[in-house]
Amino acid sequence: MSNLGFQAIYYLLNSLDYVVCERAFLSDDKDITEFERTSTPLFSLESQRPLAEFDIIAFSISFEEDYLNILKIFDLAKIPFLSSERKSAQPLIMAGGVAVSLNPEPISDFFDLFAIGEGEGFVSEFLDVFQSAQCNAKTKEHLLEALIPVEGVYIPSFYKVTYKEIFIEKVQAVKGAPEKVKSRKVKNLNAFSTPASNILTNETNFRNTYLMEVERGCGRGCRFCAAGFIYLPPRERGLAGLKKEVMKGMEKTGKVGLVGAAVSEYSGLISLCKTVIENEGELTLSSIRLDVLNQENLQILRSSGYKTMTIAPEAGSERLRDVINKKISEQNILESITLISKAGIQKLKLYFIIGLPTETIEDMAAVVDLVLKIQTAMQGGLITLSINPFIPKPVTPFQWCGYEDIKSLRNKMDIIKKGLQNENGINCSFLSPREGYIQTLLSVGDRRIGNILVDAHKKGWREALKKSEPTPDFYTSRERGFSEMLPWDFIDTGIEKEYLWKEYQRALKGQTTPSCDTGRCIRCGVCIER
Ligand code: SF4
């Protein structure tokens, strides 16, 4: 329920006079047992109607880790997994969200269609066509054919994939489907109401926080970051509208959370903070770029109740930060930390990635070294370190990279643990390299992954991975070449593949690339009218 995309689409749907949209979630484990014991099909929250009785079931999927949960929902709702096995009278099952907009292929066998890209403009256009097609179409195939012209619609059964040995050779569009599916973008964010947590519930992580989107897209170009690339170009929401949203948040909970890929670069940030301070409220930001901090804005942030600073150096050495295009020097980092400490902020959350392209063991020592220097600059307080393995993501310059060997990642984690184990006030958390491996498989896999998911749902990952053909390592562990057809190549995100490759080559040479210069720059292709 904290997902703003989910909430925005829920409100847009219910604002259409011919639509009723209800919510459904995967239940907690104890409730699942009860559903199974009583053989009750999964139902919606609002009217307790079984999911299988709706015209459409639409999933919002932000994370690949949820793919197994989708199968659990299908099971509980008593709906066959495979779209090819479902009857025309059964609901149309579709999905949108960032994970499927990057690469829907691993779950393409389970869905009738996907909504690729940003959802706001899609919703009413899609439902207008759906409504008239539903009356006339005799079969589900006819209904799907009628939906082809809606921009952003991807119907997996209308794309035939052929393989040469184990590599994708060709993807052929049939039934009049376009060869490339255009990912939808919202040109003017202000044309739609601000995604915000209009429904607040105690059952979520952000239960007391009124979240709102302030901007979309990040022009910094960090080369590992899917959220940065998929939401390009950077776009801001108008300040006047956001101030109204802040006031709504003040009335609801007194605490607002600003959300976006580059919140700290929002041009009206300080003005929004001042609105919070004037109303004696509290503020939280999803994360902050160190190089935008100065004494004045830190004081304002502090006065608006900002207690924990979340920052992401990502790599310990300057060399590796150049490889990933982070563009921040050690001196910048330490100067900003000193300012943070002087502003009275005592809690720091630091994000690092390990297993990055070109990384060596020396880069692990550099992480330890940098954290110790940050600790000194903080002069006390608490540092929480979050260390995550690098996961190659589609639509980024690192989409051709492999995931590092699990043993090697564990070894690297041990170096960091040992280097910091005697330090008071530093806590470390690590994402398990094995979890990262599965996440990689689900991020960069093709439609053959569907079988593995069904096996993993029935027998667990260990069994499923043993049986996989091609082997899981084929997807996760090898570096790909430019000419290899990637499973998500049929999606036109507006970013040219050649640009991403060029960026990858620059990364390998340790060359940085400047941030977006929206309005003047056309280098990645997104800002060219399509
Ligand atoms: S064309 Fe330039 S400004 Fe536009 S998104 Fe790409 S890099 Fe950024």
Image (spheres, rainbow, N blue to C red):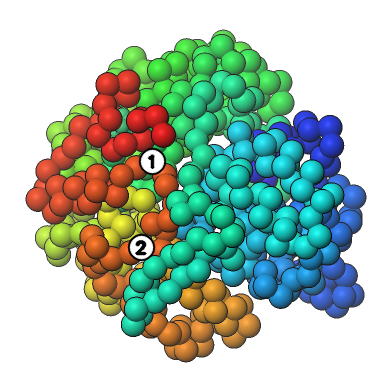
Query: Label 1's element?
Result: loop
Cα separation between marks 2 and 1: 16 Å
- Estimate the x, y position of residue 340 in percent, counting from the top left: 32, 28
Q: Secondary structure at mark 2?
A: loop
**Residue 306 relative to residue 140: left or right:** left
**Does any portion of residue 523 appear in the rendered image?**
yes
Left or right of 261 on screen, residue 198: right
User: Which numbered marker is on residue 125?
Assistant: none
Q: Which residue was labeled with disc 2?
A: 486
Is 215 in front, or is 469? 469
The image shows residue 103, relative to residue 77, as above or below, that is above
Look at label 1 and name its amino acid.
Gly
Say which residue label 1 marks.
494
In the drawing, does residue 59 fall left or right of residue 232? right
Q: Quadrant of residue 394?
A: bottom left
**Can see residue 59?**
no
Q: Amino acid at mark 2?
A: Leu
Q: Nearer the viewer, residue 288 or 1?
A: 1
